[in-house]
Image (spheres, grey):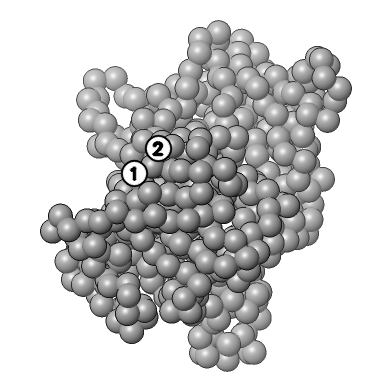
Amino acid sequence: MASFDVIIIGAGLGGINSAYRLQQQLPHLSYAILETRDKIGGTWDLFRYPGIRSDSDLDTYGFAWKPWNQPSPIGKGAEILNYMKEAAAEQGIDRHIELRRQLRSASWSSEKQRWTLTVDDQSAAEGRRPLLYSARFLLLCTGYFDFHQPLETVIPGLENFQGHVVHPQFWPEDLDYAGKNVVVVGSGATAITLLPALAEKAARVTMLQRSPSYIVEIPSNRSGRDSWLSRFLPSWILHPWRRLISMLWSRYIFLSCQAHPEKARERLIGMLDGKLPPHLPVNPHFTPSYFPYDQRVTLTPDGDFFKCLRSGKGDVKTGVVKQVVTDGILVQTTTKEGDGDNEDLFLGADIIVTATGLKIQIGGGITFEVDGKSVSPSDQLLWRGSMMQGMPNFGLMLGYTSISYTLGLDAAVLIFCRVLKLMERKKATTVIPRVDPGVTLSLRPYDNLTSTYVLRGIHLLPKVADKAPWLPRSSILSDYWAAHFGRIDTCLEMIKGEGPGLQERKKTS
């Protein structure tokens, strides 16, 4: 049985970042990263649809400790994957990664004060017995969506279609869409990315949406001032500066939209003036029914989405799918919001792309036990955004949904490392977040986004409450302050084992 102080599950952004923080702050601890896939990268290795890119700037979406040196702050999928591989290699993290290791179950023993992991070796012959690993701490960095199944969406008659039906999560490498008519069902970031990318080869691409999203044009290259600074400032100064400015700016935009939702709505819709072709009115095609940041605002670098619409190779239809037939989709379109003036339309298609969202899953389908009793992270309260109520020596690394995901991951692992240091000082071997006796908590939603995939999977997300340290995350600035300077000794039960403490145990192993 392979034994480590810490085992990290997942070699995506969260796993690589957690490994870096761990080896920088607690270099005396041994660790391994177990990754199900045959390559590192997580999301950025899985998703390979045309045009895939980040929907946040890499100054904040990237690692705090690894500058993003590309001319554009919006990274393409292949660029981000290479950046992650580079980061892992530079820090020696890649030497700790074991690929094709799928964690099936994790069982905690209070007697042994260790997790025992049952792991399938994906590279082994079928029928081979699973591998066993042992760890004092288990750090889950598997993200928040199901890698094996997309969000199930009922599209009437889809089984009748005789062309290709594809989901962006599992894009076929050999799919030939050149000269074809493509219909992309959806209106989120993926659909808005796909439309201009597919239109480069397809005869025509239509985005079919039930309801619109806010779409904001951003420049793909950095500002002139930033380019000027990059000539004189070293990267160890420039990167933190870029990161800080982007964090502050995104926080300002978010708070402004929350404080003045009507004005924000008018401003974002007003920014569409002159960007749309005459046949596509703002209402109903670009007038969302919700306020900005009730769902995430989508971005289009250099307005490539709008350019595609103006070129005539791309189009948008708003309505409800009545029926999919052998060669296309019958749609009841909306011609004007709220006036009941609808008409039926046929969209001919050779390919239908179902960009209808991700299926939320916490823990990657792993089963957990604590002293023989089944537990689920989704049923537990989240302690300071990083550990789970009642789960010993266990960390859950989740990022933000409204702003750059990686910022949340980093805040969570910084707190986790501080807890381990506190355990060393107290010579504790086990830590368990617990609600103080006599305290009454009222549950709050983990996330306030109203996106379909969030609403359908909200029950699968960890629980948060109305009192610290069980509160939902409030902002990146307060979270980073808490990660570095906030109290971390509340609602934690620390147990001293019969043997040596954390640091001493490592020295004797």
Look at the picture and state if 167 lies above or below 307: above
**x 58%, y 24%: residue:** 366
Which residue is located at x 60 percent, y 47 percent?
164
Neighbourhood count class around disc 2 (C-alpha, 10 Å): few under 14, some 14–19, many 20 upward: some
The x and y percentages for residue 360 are 46, 37
Is there CB contact under 8 Å for labels 2 and 1?
A: yes
Q: Name the residue under label 2.
A: 156
Give percent across and percent down for residue 113: 62, 18
Task: Report the side of 410 relative to 507 (left or right).
Answer: left
Task: Check disc 2 and give the amino acid type.
Answer: Pro
Q: What residue sits 51% from the left and 26% below the top?
A: 431
**Figure quadrant of residue 6:** top right
- Dot 1: few (<14), some (14–19), or many (≥20) neighbours within 10 Å? some
Based on the displayed image, in which of its 4 quarters is residue 425 positioned?
Answer: top right
The answer to which of marks 2 and 1 sits earlier in the sequence is: 2
Residue placed most toward the observer, 318 or 219: 318
Residue at the left extreme? 339
Residue 345 image point, x, y percent: 34, 56
How far across and down, in percent of the image, does residue 460 sit? Answer: 41, 30
Residue 432 versus residue 456 in the image, above or below: above
Amino acid type shown at disc 1: Lys
**Where 209 sits versus 108, above or below?**
below
At 65% across and 75% down in the image, what residue appears? 70
**Image quadrant for the N terminus?**
top right
Judged from this view, the residue extending furthest toward the right is 125
The front one of 311 and 498 is 311
Side (left or right) of 460 relative to 129: left
Q: Which mark is residue 37?
A: none
Q: What element carries label 2?
A: loop
Which secondary structure, mark 1? Answer: strand
* Residue at the disc numbered 1: 322
Disc 2 and disc 1: Cα gap in Å? Answer: 7 Å
